[in-house]
């Protein structure tokens, strides 16, 4: 099983949106039996809380149910059992690189939007998705679009990784 985790600050907005969107895309690509996606936050500020209602509403517009989601904090042992660790902003990227136990673990950490063709090759500071928590529904729509633009690239990357394993 190829394991992906999406990571933001509190795991109530960006990373669960990315988790559900990527899970749907993986299923649509016929990879659901080979790939699993989950999410976490860098901090424990929101641990145990449900997804932000604005994020849930945006996901529901696409038919994605998120009621069961509960925020949790990233655990260091996940460096060992995740194949791809996708961060939603440069602060998360830097923090996970700092926490990674070795070079192999650091190599798993990528910016989510590094898979967006319009941003590929740019510095992590230019690939971030700002936190919509401070905004309104329009900010969650913008977050949706930023995530959506990177999803096809991630699915293609995972497909190639799975092919290389076979």
Image (cartoon, helix red, strand yellow):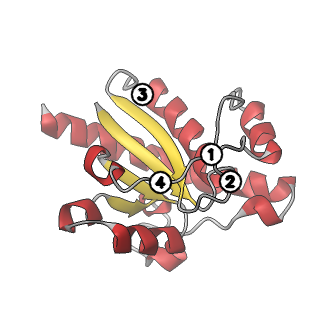
* Neighbourhood count class around disc 1 (C-alpha, 10 Å): few under 14, some 14–19, many 20 upward: many
The residue lying at 75 percent from left, 61 percent from top is: 132
Q: Nearer the viewer, mark 1 or mark 3?
A: 1
Of the numbered discs 2 and 1, the one sitting upstream in the chain is 2
Of the numbered discs 1 and 3, the one sitting upstream in the chain is 3
User: In the rendered image, which residue does mark 1 sit on?
Assistant: 71
Left or right position of 156 against 17: left
User: In the rendered image, which residue does mark 3 sit on?
Assistant: 29
Label 2 secondary element: loop
Q: Which mark is residue 74?
A: 4
Label 4 secondary element: loop
75 or 53, which is in the foreground? 75
Could you tell me residue 47's position as x and y percent? Answer: 63, 49
Q: Which mark is residue 46?
A: 2
Q: Are marks 2 and 1 in contact (CB under 8 Å)?
A: yes
Occupied quadrant, residue 65: top right
């Amino acid at each position: 099983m190829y394991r992906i985790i999406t990571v933001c600050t509190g795991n109530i907005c960006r990373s669960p949106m990315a988790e559900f969107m990527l899970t749907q895309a993986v299923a649509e690509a016929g990879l659901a039996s080979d790939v699993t996606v989950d999410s976490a936050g860098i901090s424990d500020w929101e641990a145990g809380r449900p997804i932000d209602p604005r994020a849930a509403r945006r996901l529901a517009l696409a038919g994605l149910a998120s009621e069961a989601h509960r925020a949790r904090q990233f655990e260091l042992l996940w460096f060992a059992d995740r194949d791809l660790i996708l961060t939603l902003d440069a602060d998360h990227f830097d923090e996970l690189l700092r926490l990674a136990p070795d070079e192999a673990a650091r190599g798993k950490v990528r910016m989510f939007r590094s898979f967006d063709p319009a941003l590929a090759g740019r510095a992590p500071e230019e690939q971030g998705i700002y936190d919509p928590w401070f905004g309104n529904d329009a900010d969650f729509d913008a977050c949706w679009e930023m995530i959506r633009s990177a999803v096809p690239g991630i699915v293609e990357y995972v497909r190639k990784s799975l092919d290389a394993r076979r």
